[in-house]
Image (tube, grey):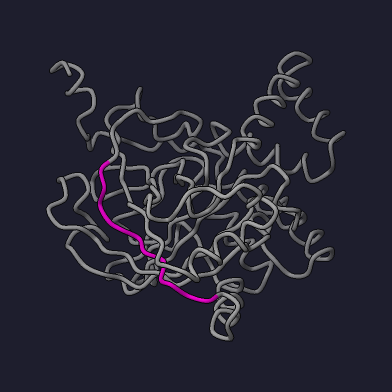
Amino acid sequence: MSHTHQRELTPSTHWKEVPSVDEAERFASYAKQFEAIQARKSQQYGVGRALHRKQIVAATASLEVLAQLPPFAAHGLFATPGNFDVLVRLSNGGMDKASDRRPDIRGFSFRVLGVKGDSALNNGPAKSQDFTLINQEKFAFAGSDEFVGFVVAASGGAAALVKHLIQRYGLLGGPRRLVQMAKSLKKPFSGFATETMYSSVPMACGPYAVRVRLMPSPTNGAPVIGADADWGADFSARMAKQELSWELQLQPFVNETLTPIEDASVNWSSPYVTVGRLTVHKQDAASAQGKALTEEVESSVFDPWQALLAHRPLGDVQRARKVIYFQSQQGRGAA
């Protein structure tokens, strides 16, 4: 690697957010639109989330934070080595409780308990450090405006979605955008124990900024043909037999060109560094304890803003989530 290329990939603290002047108004509007979708879907399925409505599995886990981390990583949760209790929620990303075979975004959220430090919401000590990961390395949209427009249109059915895309992107651009979205949703997925998961958007890490990745261990086993009939059964069967583990990794901001803060549709090109190991304990999801955990996790909050100030979510999509997630939590009585 050349010295110039090494300099380009050196973690930097020279990142900045660029909020638009109309964000407060826009985000409040987004929250109202999601509130309407959530209310409509809750009439159909019962009280639940606006997105990631279908819970696949709930599990207990532990996180080991490793020692001797590089300077960009050793902040907040990762400042010192340690072990933490964790709650895990796996989900399909859609607004419906659809078949697992239906193309969808897959979600891997986990809440790290027992953290110490100020909250990202500036409301006292942080209750936890939450991570909300998906099976896409980058977000399908550059910003929240595109994302919300797509979700609202999609909630009205195929015809409404096509109309929205043509109005927004033109007669040629609309169909092209639809193909891009279909490709993203149809990305092959091998299962929650075997697939790599990503934050897709950044968060602070002390004075640095990072994206997050969860890499499954080969010891979790190989993908199983036909597992897409029931992702929950596949994962539950694995954790009934053995522990499952992943490497938790951080990817640093290096410059605005290679690792933009505000544009969520760009793959960051800096290298990942392993900072911890997440282990899902051997457990029986069908036991009384497992069923109680399922109910607890379903009613719980997994929110990137439920975090340490040292890991404040960054960028337009994350700032929009702050408002939209809170509205969704209120809509199901979780806030």
Q: In percent of the image, x 19 and y 59: which residue is there? A: 79
Figure check: 155 above or below 137: below
Highlighted range, magenta: 273-284
Tag count? 0
Question: What residue is rendered at 51% in x and 55% in y?
Answer: 108
Q: Main secondary structure of the magenta part?
A: strand
Q: Position of residue 186 (x, y in %)?
A: 65, 35
Decide if residue 48 is on the left or right side of residue 325.
right
Nearer the observer, 147 or 5: 5
Q: Nearer the viewer, residue 213 or 200?
A: 213
Extreme bottom residue here?
288
Q: Does 74 appear above or below 144?
A: below
Residue occupying image coordinates x 55% and y 61% = 235
x and y, in percent, of residue 48 in the image = 70, 66
Instruction: Check if residue 282 falls in the magenta segment.
Output: yes
Vertical side of 80 occupied by 222: above or below: above
Relative image position of residue 122 (x, y in whole percent)? 37, 64
Depth order, front residue of 123/158: 158
Question: Magenta stretch containing residue 266, yes or no?
Answer: no
Residue 55 on image: x %, y %: 63, 63
Quadrant of residue 103 within the rendered picture: top right
- Locate the C terminus and report the quarter of the image it occupies: bottom right
